[in-house]
Structures are given as structure tokens and as C-alpha cells.
Image (cartoon, coloured by chain):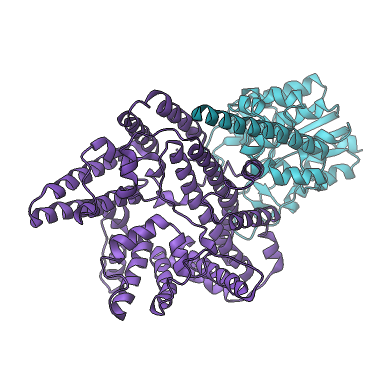
Chain colours: A purple, B cyan
């Protein structure tokens, strides 16, 4: 059940009605309804994996309590590592086993040993990377005594399986979400109104920006051998907007839907393409994942506090693991590695926290520098996206090689430029720029006009027949 | 109170969206009704009534195989309404639409062979009729059995949303400009280039079935005094036909079998589609067999 499907358009009002009119007496009835709705939502993808979700929920609930109750360090450690290893074990089996098995087999073959690896014929359970990380953060926080274990199974289940964030995030923290599900939600008109605007904005990003750009990006990437250099560059720009519109659009719909139920989720994007350097980009892109890795991997490894080699090591680890989180493919590893290379000079020169203020442009020389920095950062990001989008690592290198052949054919380029898409992208960038200080650009000043324009553009230019689902569902 | 306000707010957004959809539906439909150059359907719909000596119907195997100019050179007023991917569902509708628009037709040549495998509509072609849905009784009646009929008919703008890539904003915009499409060039005939050397084998591993749309075409032609010439057009030598064409003749003996009239690879672009050279050889044969009297 996609957020942009008719099925969801029927599902959401039904749950909304039941939540506020039938099951609104206590927080427990509200939570119970949301769990049933969430399990139904998840089973629409593949009911067979529901057991995995329930098992993962039960495991972390139980181990969380055991960690808290344990008197000895040894017992605490046992329950802690049991939870970590089972969670990561599931992730490893479903997501990474085949990759490692075939990669090792290829490596042995290259040394002259013929190996036929045993490969699993399983599909990746949707959302596994997201709900596993919910559970992990909960258990780690209990182990380090940052939070108390949750004893109410219903409340904890809702934290793990809340349907707006279940299949593609944002990756929530127990410290943020659990306190909200532990109290009865009262209806708030302003919050619900904001949520509705955010849903419309997310839908606009998905069906107008992402799916329109996808048509051109797919054509260029699928036929890169016959494209000239400028078309290939254009292809990376289309993909940059495709993935941003797709993923941040999903996040916006998730946040908006959740607001309808009176629950705030973590913000996942903060206008990342207006970043002035890569460090700022990573503070604005997929914030819930970046901050997860920062808090649960980078800082425990020592962060940027150690010596030079430790800083370098930690930077590479966090970016490569982040790339690998996206999928078992060398392309994602390479994407992570490139971002580490981008980030490292900023860290070593202590410039990684230079741009923490609001980005602003006026008619001045410094603003020209800011604008150039934004464009440069966007260029770097687009370059890294080539690896993220390419079928395999060789395709990515071939794609880049063809860009640097500087073969220019304007006829070829003309075929890849759609004036409607260009116009919509310009409108999109300008609207985001003018509203970059608020979470959803459709709110704030002239909100009625902005909503009207968004609806008109969705109707006029939205791609509803495209079979593309949200890119991040595969992760 | 807060909930009441919210429900009112949602209601307003719904009404606004519905009104926008209604207005846009009317604007789009009006725009499509103004153009006669974008597609074969718009050509039928917006051209003045014509006296045709020959009308060609069918799929790409009609579109790519009957050279209109060779008919017109013989003095026969002809148009090739064959369409890529079209099935008998659409061919039947084209014929009905031509008659609804008061065109007079003496002869219909229709390619009936592989299209007998099912009675389904063609997903890529039927949607081209949708903009004319409200205006044409024939189209509305023909589409009544479609699963989506009620959604197309009663939900304004749904058809344009669903098939945005084919009849969406871009197509509507070009219709407003009446920008010429390439479907109606060369009297509707679309030529194919030579093959690059290796023709893929085409395997006809399905059965022909009696087809209600073909039966309907026969009835319409009889009722309107139109001479119907149903033809099976050539396939390449490599085609594994499994007696398919014989089985077609067992079902419908009146269909002329021209499967083996042109066979050499040099006349084909793909196994089921002749190139321009092959189409000319084939059309000459058809003219000779069916129109030599009229041409004399």
C-alpha cells in the first residue's frame, strides 16, 4: 500500500475516523487501534513478514526489560548482545548474506579456486532496515541507561510498528516517540492542518518532481552509452531531484499523516540542496539516519576526539557503513566512500561545523561565494549519486568516463530537456528557497495560494500511472 | 469544535480539488476536440465527411503493410487507419466512428490474423479515444463494458490523470497548438526501415478464437453496403506459425491468406513487420488482386 495509492486514500480516512471518533476514549484504545492499523498496513506488502516484525518487537521489548532488571554487568551484557546479534543477524541474512557469499565466491574464483556459493532465495522484507534500527536504538539507550525500559507491550509495539514510519522511516528514537505514545492524544486543529499541507507537499514532491524526473533520469542512465556528456550531466541532476523528491516526499507524507494522529515524528530533511558544504549536507539529508549513525556508531568509536588516524578511520567507517545500510551492492559502498572523501578535508581542517547558521543570500560578494558553495556542493552530491543510481560499479565508472569524454551533441541534449519539467523544478527550488525557514513550504505566508498551486500541478503534471514505488522501500 | 473546523477544512480542499478536476476535464476535452492533426482519432473526429474508396484497419501489421500512396495513385481515395498495438476492439471502434462522422466507405481492408488471439482492448491504443468519450455516443457505448468505465465517465479528469503520459498535459498542449503529429503523414501509412541483418524468430504459440469485434465489423459492413476484405498479412520465413493461419481459415474461411506472399528476409524489418520495400510488393499484389477492375 503506497502512500500515493487509492488504497491508502481509503485506508487513511477510515483509521482517522476510528481513531478520533470510536477509539478516542483512552490512550490504550488509541494505541491498540494504531497497532492493528499498522499491522494491516504492513501485511498489505507481504503478510508473511509480519512474524518478523512481531518477533523483532517482542525480542527488543523483552531484552530491554531484562537489561534493566539485571543486577550484574555480565547479565546486562548477555541480553544486550543477544538483542544486537539477533537484530543484526536478521538484517544480515535477509539483506547482506547473498552479497557476501557471491563476493567471496568471486574473490576465490579470481585466485583460481572454483566456488559455488549457497545463495538464499529470499526477498528483502520491506522496512527491515528501518524497524531494526528503531529496536537497536531502544536497546542501546537502555543499556547505556539513557532511558528506562518500556513495560507496556502495546506502547512499545506502537513505537516499533507505527505505520507512517514503518516502511521507510524516519528512524525514530525512543526518547522522542515513546513519550508521545504514552499519553492520550487530543485533537489539535493547527497540527492536523499542518499535517494535511505536508501530505499535499509530499505528494507533490513524489508524483510531480520525483516521478517526472524519473522518466528522464531512467532514460539517460539506461541508455548512457548513446548519450553525450551534457545529457549525462543532466541525467545526474534529474536523478538528484528524483531521489530527493521521492524520499523527502515520502518523509513529508509520513510526518503529515502522523500529525493527523497527533504524533510528531523526527524531521528527516532540511532543504539539503541548499547546503554550503558536504558536512552541512549530511546535517540536512536523511537526518534521522545520519544522527543515528552519529550517536550509535561515530561517537562510541571516539568521534572526532582522537588523533588524526582515529578521525580518518571513524569518518570512513561511518560513511561506508551508511552507504552499506542502503543495500548490499558495491555501488552503495562506493557512494559512502566518496562522501567520506568529501567530508574528510572539512574535518581535518576543522571546518565541518562552519555552516551551522541559516543559509542566506543578499546582493553582496559574500553571497556570491555562498551561492558558488551551494552549487559546488550540489555538484559534488550529483557526482556521488551516479554510484547510487548505477546498476553496478562498472556502469558507474563507464558513465563517468563518458562524461569526461566531453562529447557534446546538442540534438541529443535537446531530447532530454523538457520545458515543463524545467519550469516545475524552478518553481520547486524557488518555493523551497523562499520557505527554507519552515518545515513545510506550503505553510506560512500565502499558504492557501501555495496549496492551490500544488494541487493544480499535481493534477496537471502528476505521474499516477507510473509503476515506480518509493526508492527507499528497497532499503 | 477543532475537529469540526478540520473536517470543514478537508471538505473545502476536496471541493476545491473536485472543481479543479471538473474545469480541467472540460478544458482538456475541449482542447482535444479542436485538433485534427495529432492522431488518427483526432483526424477522424475533426475532419469533414469524406467519400473513401478504401479504408484500411488493423494493427501495426496493417499500418506498416498497406502503402496508401499506391492506392491513391490508382485513383482510389484511401486512408490507412491501422494503429500500432491496436486490436480488433479498436479497429471496430474506428469503423464505427468513421460512420458516425458521416464518412462514406466503399471498401474496408482489415488485417485479421494474430489479433484473433484475444478479445482484449489494446492498453496503449484505446486510451486515445478517451478524450472524445463525452462527445461521441459510439465511443461511450463501445467502452461501456470496460472495467474502468464508471471511473472514466463519472470522475472528472480521471482519464487524463491515469494516462498522463499519453493524453496528459503535453498532448493537450500540443492539441491546443494543433501541432501536427506524425500519425497522419503519408495517408496514415508508416514505413519501416530494413532489418539490420538478423531477424528474430516469431513463434505463434497461441490459438485463434472467434472474435466478437470482428463479427461486429462484418455486420456493420453488411448493413452499410461496404465491401469487407479481411486479410492475413505476411510473416517472415523464420516464423514458426504452428498452422496458426490454417486454423484462422478454419474459423473464418473468408479471410484471405497472404502469409506466404512475401517471405524473403530482405523485405522484412522484423519477423512480423515488412519494411517499405516489402510493403510495396505486398500492396501491389493486393491492388492487383482486389482493385484491378476498379483501377482499369
Which residue does the image show at 36% across and 36% down from the upper left?
A38
* Up-down relation of residue B267 to residue A331 (above or below): above
Measured as percent of width and height from the top left, residue A391 is found at: 46, 61
Q: Is residue B211 left or right of residue A392?
A: right
Above or below B208: residue A311: below
Judge by depth and name the residue closer to the eye, B102 or A250.
A250
Could you say which quadrant of the image residue A240 lies in? bottom right
Q: Is B19 positioned to the left or the right of A188 in the image?
A: right
Q: Quadrant of residue A402?
A: bottom right
Q: From where the camera sits, is residue B208 visible?
A: no
Q: Judge whether residue A435 can be spotted in this image.
A: yes
Residue B97 locus on image (x, y percent) = 77, 28
Residue found at the very far front of the displayed protein: B1
In percent of width and height, residue A421 lies at 65, 54
Q: Position of residue A103 (x, y in %)?
A: 31, 65
Which of these two is toward me, A393 or B2?
Answer: B2
Q: How many marks?
A: 0
- Residues B15 and B175: in front is B15
Quarter of the rendering containing residue B145: top right
Residue drawn at point x = 49 percent, y = 47 percent? A252
Q: Give the quarter of the figure containing the N terminus of chain A.
A: top left
Above or below residue A28? Residue B205 is below
Amino acid at each position: 500500500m503506497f502512500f500515493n495509492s487509492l488504497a491508502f486514500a481509503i485506508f487513511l480516512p477510515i483509521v482517522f475516523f476510528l481513531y478520533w471518533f470510536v477509539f478516542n476514549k483512552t490512550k490504550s484504545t488509541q494505541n491498540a487501534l494504531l497497532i492493528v492499523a499498522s499491522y494491516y498496513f504492513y501485511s498489505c506488502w507481504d503478510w508473511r513478514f509480519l512474524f518478523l516484525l512481531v518477533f523483532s518487537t517482542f525480542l527488543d521489548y523483552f531484552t530491554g526489560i531484562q537489561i534493566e532488571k539485571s543486577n550484574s554487568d555480565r547479565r546486562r551484557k548477555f541480553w544486550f548482545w543477544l538483542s544486537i546479534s539477533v537484530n543484526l543477524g536478521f538484517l544480515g541474512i535477509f539483506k547482506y548474506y547473498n552479497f557476501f557469499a557471491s563476493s567471496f565466491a568471486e574473490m576465490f574464483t579470481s585466485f583460481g579456486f572454483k566456488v559455488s556459493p549457497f545463495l538464499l532465495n529470499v526477498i528483502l522484507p520491506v522496512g527491515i532496515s528501518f524497524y531494526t534500527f528503531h529496536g537497536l536504538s531502544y536497546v542501546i539507550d537502555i543499556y547505556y541507561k539513557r532511558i528506562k525500559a518500556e513495560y507496556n507491550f502495546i506502547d512499545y509495539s506502537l513505537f516499533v510498528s507505527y505505520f507512517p514510519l514503518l516502511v521507510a522511516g524516519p528512524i525514530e528514537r525512543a526518547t522522542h516517540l515513546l513519550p508521545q505514545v504514552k499519553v492520550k492524544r487530543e485533537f489539535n486543529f493547527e497540527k492536523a492542518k499542518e499535517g494535511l499541507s505536508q501530505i499535499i507537499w509530499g505528494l507533490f514532491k513524489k508524483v510531480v518532481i520525483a516521478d517526472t524526473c524519473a522518466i528522464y533520469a531512467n532514460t539517460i542512465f539506461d541508455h548512457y552509452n548513446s548519450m553525450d556528456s551534457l545529457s549525462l550531466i543532466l541525467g545526474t541532476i534529474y536523478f538528484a531531484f528524483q531521489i530527493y523528491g521521492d524520499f523527502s516526499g515520502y518523509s513529508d507524507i509520513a510526518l503529515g499523516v502522523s500529525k493527523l494522529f497527533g504524533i510528531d515524528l523526527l524531521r528527516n530533511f532540511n532543504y539539503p540542496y541548499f547546503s554550503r558544504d558536504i558536512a552541512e549536507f549530511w546535517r540536512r539529508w536523511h537526518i534521522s539516519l545520519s544522527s543515528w549513525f552519529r550517536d550509535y556508531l561515530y561517537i562510541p568509536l571516539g568521534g572526532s576526539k582522537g588523533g588524526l588516524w582515529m578521525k580518518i578511520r571513524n569518518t570512513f567507517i561511518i560513511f561506508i557503513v551508511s552507504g552499506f545500510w542502503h543495500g548490499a551492492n558495491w555501488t552503495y559502498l562506493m557512494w559512502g566512500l566518496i562522501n567520506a572523501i568529501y567530508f574528510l578535508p572539512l574535518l581535518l581542517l576543522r571546518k565541518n561545523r562552519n555552516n551551522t547558521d541559516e543559509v542566506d543570500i543578499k546582493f553582496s560578494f559574500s553571497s556570491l561565494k555562498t551561492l558558488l558553495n551551494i552549487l559546488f556542493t550540489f555538484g559534488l552530491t550529483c557526482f556521488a549519486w551516479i554510484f547510487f543510481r548505477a546498476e553496478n560499479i562498472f556502469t558507474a565508472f563507464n558513465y563517468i568516463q563518458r562524461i569526461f569524454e566531453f562529447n557534446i551533441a546538442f540534438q541529443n541534449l535537446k531530447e532530454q530537456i523538457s520545458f515543463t519539467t524545467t519550469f516545475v523544478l524552478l518553481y520547486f527550488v524557488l518555493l523551497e528557497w523562499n520557505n527554507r525557514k519552515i518545515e513545510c513550504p506550503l505553510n506560512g505566508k500565502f499558504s492557501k495560494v501555495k496549496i492551490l498551486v500544488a494541487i493544480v500541478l499535481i493534477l496537471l503534471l502528476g505521474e499516477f500511472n507510473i509503476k515506480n514505488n518509493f526508492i527507499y522501500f528497497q532499503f | 469544535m477543532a475537529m469540526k473546523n478540520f473536517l470543514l477544512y478537508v471538505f473545502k480542499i476536496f471541493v476545491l480539488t473536485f472543481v479543479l478536476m471538473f474545469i480541467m476535464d472540460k478544458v482538456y476535452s475541449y482542447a482535444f476536440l479542436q485538433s485534427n492533426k495529432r492522431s488518427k482519432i483526432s483526424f477522424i473526429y475533426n475532419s469533414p465527411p469524406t467519400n473513401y474508396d478504401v479504408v484500411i484497419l488493423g494493427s501495426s501489421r496493417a499500418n506498416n503493410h498497406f502503402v496508401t500512396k499506391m492506392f491513391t495513385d490508382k485513383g482510389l481515395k484511401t486512408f490507412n487507419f491501422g494503429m500500432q498495438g491496436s486490436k480488433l476492439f479498436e479497429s471496430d471502434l474506428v469503423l464505427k466512428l468513421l460512420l458516425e462522422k458521416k464518412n462514406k466507405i466503399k471498401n474496408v481492408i482489415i488485417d485479421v490474423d494474430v489479433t484473433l488471439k484475444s478479445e482484449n482492448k489494446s492498453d496503449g491504443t484505446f486510451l486515445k479515444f478517451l478524450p472524445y468519450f463525452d462527445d461521441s455516443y459510439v465511443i461511450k457505448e463501445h467502452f461501456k463494458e470496460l472495467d474502468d468505465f464508471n471511473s472514466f465517465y463519472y470522475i472528472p479528469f480521471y482519464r487524463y490523470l491515469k494516462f498522463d503520459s499519453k493524453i496528459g498535459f503535453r498532448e493537450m498542449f500540443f492539441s491546443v497548438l494543433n501541432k501536427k503529429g506524425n500519425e497522419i503523414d503519408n495517408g496514415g501509412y508508416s514505413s519501416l526501415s530494413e532489418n539490420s541483418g538478423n531477424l528474430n524468430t516469431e513463434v505463434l504459440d497461441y490459438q485463434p478464437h472467434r472474435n466478437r469485434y470482428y463479427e461486429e465489423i462484418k455486420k456493420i459492413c453488411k448493413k452499410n453496403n461496404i465491401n469487407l476484405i479481411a486479410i492475413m498479412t505476411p510473416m517472415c520465413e523464420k516464423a514458426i506459425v504452428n498452422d496458426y493461419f490454417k486454423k484462422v481459415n478454419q474459423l473464418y474461411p473468408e479471410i484471405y491468406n497472404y502469409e506466404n506472399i512475401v517471405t524473403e528476409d530482405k523485405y522484412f524489418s522484423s519477423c512480423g513487420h515488412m519494411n517499405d520495400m516489402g510493403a510495396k510488393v505486398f500492396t501491389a499484389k493486393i491492388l492487383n488482386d482486389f482493385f484491378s477492375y476498379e483501377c482499369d
